[in-house]
Image (cartoon, coloured by chain):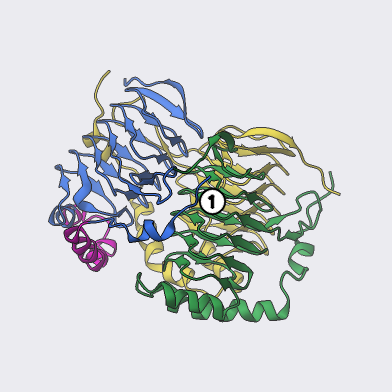
Chain colours: A green, B blue, C yellow
Amino acid sequence: MGEVDVAANRAAPRYSRGENARRVAWALAGPLFRFSPRPCFAWRRLLLRLFGARVGRAAHVYPTTVVAMPWNLTLGEEASLGEHVFVYDLGPVSVGARATVALRAHLCAGSHDLRRADLPLLKPPIVIGAQAFVAADAFVGPGVTVGEGAVVGARAVVVRDVAPWTVVAGNPARVIGTRSLS
Amino acid sequence: MGEVDVAANRAAPRYSRGENARRVAWALAGPLFRFSPRPCFAWRRLLLRLFGARVGRAAHVYPTTVVAMPWNLTLGEEASLGEHVFVYDLGPVSVGARATVALRAHLCAGSHDLRRADLPLLKPPIVIGAQAFVAADAFVGPGVTVGEGAVVGARAVVVRDVAPWTVVAGNPARVIGTRSLS
Amino acid sequence: MGEVDVAANRAAPRYSRGENARRVAWALAGPLFRFSPRPCFAWRRLLLRLFGARVGRAAHVYPTTVVAMPWNLTLGEEASLGEHVFVYDLGPVSVGARATVALRAHLCAGSHDLRRADLPLLKPPIVIGAQAFVAADAFVGPGVTVGEGAVVGARAVVVRDVAPWTVVAGNPARVIGTRSLS
């Protein structure tokens, strides 16, 4: 079966020198974000932009939202990342205009190639389409695109793409309906 | 398909003025709860009651338990809300006598109508019956009643009512047995 | 149906006097662990060993990893417990050499016998085999053995044993493949 080579995994460079410097700076700046008063959305947008995020007008991010690497984040106009949302954006994460990622959801844009002995770190992108709604506690895995207007149900676990204007739920998530707006 | 109207959603009043005042007061009082020593159950019952909760004799709530809005919470005698339990009680949440909500479970009494363009906030109730047991990491969704004595398994995701003295598990949760006490 | 007897449950001794003393000491020592700088893996190994854990060479545990009771933990060489992993080791938890427990996974070695009126606390062991990989947000339940080299997928919920070198996913988890290393 071969043997997992943790030493090789740990010795492999994961981030560029510049990225490591940004990670340290972002960790140091963390309290400015986490302890900001809840209504100060503009202040948090400013902080995210200072660290390289592309953040549209009136996007809402909360003090309890965790963004691992702002420089990999793109937020459309009026998008929102809810309270306690966890954005593990080792790869690029994009949330479209007027899309909502609700309470405690996890966007996980990181993985490992488990078939290689050295378990190399992978950084696949995540795309959440415009007007989509990722409900509370949902999990969106690496490489997934959630289509425009789609709904990912509460606690759903999405590891494949979700078609536009469909509704998925469960673990693994399955299509349970379609969405239309009245 | 129509278009999501985030501006209308944000402009809609979500809480009454009185409720907003209570939310601020509860946030300010938070450290008195979170930093209380673990054995001080009576103290936390007192705090919850001061903020409008109906709390029965000998109910157990831990310092790490999160109650979003105590005024929407009813706890029966000897009920318990375990460590890191998250009670998102935008609507009324009732936990019956001698019922247990275990470690890190989430009672989510809030939702949005995703078929309306302005995504109005909904606040459906949750009822956990007497003697029921909601296991670790489980999720109980908006509008759900968990019947008396029922068991919601670890990490189960419940979006429909659970009949009394049944056992459910999985995501979505399905009936996997019945419970009787010896 | 009988009646749940919470008073009997609470009156039952859960931990020995010695164990309770260790719990208090570990709580007091917590900040030395949680606020240690991320690269200080050796320091956290030392702390865990001082509190009774058996920790192999080069095992990695992060400041945000939560270990409830270090004296019940065994970590093999080059094993790792990722960020925000929650090890609820009321019973013994063993993670084999070069195994990885990823971001935010939950190893839950505690349960209750829900068929007895006094809901006695159970402390079944968990064993994670060498070279296994428990992915982000997964849940491993009480009494479970994850075989050597097996993969527990992201957010998978494992309540039965997982055979060596298999891949499981979903809630409840099912076998979806096998793993081999190249």
Q: Residue at x 52, y 65 (%)?
A: A77
Q: Residue at x 24, y 39 (%)?
A: B94
Instruction: Give the vertical position of A139 relative to C145 (above or below).
Output: below
- The quadrant in which the N terminus of chain A is found is top right
Q: Position of residue A80 (x, y in %)?
A: 47, 61
Q: Position of residue C14 (x, y in %)?
A: 34, 43
Q: Residue at x 48, y 63 (%)?
A: A78
Q: Is the residue marked by circle 1 packed among few (<14), some (14-19), or many (20+) residues within 10 Å? A: many
Instruction: Give the vertical position of C98 relative to A1 (above or below).
Output: below
**Where does the magenta region start and end?**
B16-44
Q: Label 1, on which residue? A: A132
In this view, the residue in front, C137 or B1, is B1
Q: Is residue A116 magenta?
A: no
Q: Position of residue A93 (x, y in %)?
A: 62, 62
Q: Is residue B22 magenta?
A: yes
A17 sits left or right of A79 in the view: right
Q: Magenta-highlighted stretch: main secondary structure?
A: helix
In this view, the residue in front, A103 or C72, is A103
Q: Position of residue C59 (x, y in %)?
A: 64, 61
Instruction: Give the vertical position of C63 relative to B149 (above or below).
Output: below
- In the rendered image, the residue lying farthest to the right is C182
Number of disc labels:
1
C125 sits left or right of A126 in the view: left
Quarter of the rendering containing residue C43: bottom right
**Can residue A83 be seen at all in this image of the molecule?**
no
The chain identifier of the residue carrying mark 1 reads: A
- The quadrant in which the C terminus of chain A is found is top left
A124 sits left or right of C104 in the view: right
Give the residue type at disc 1: Ala
Disc 1 is placed on an element classified as: loop
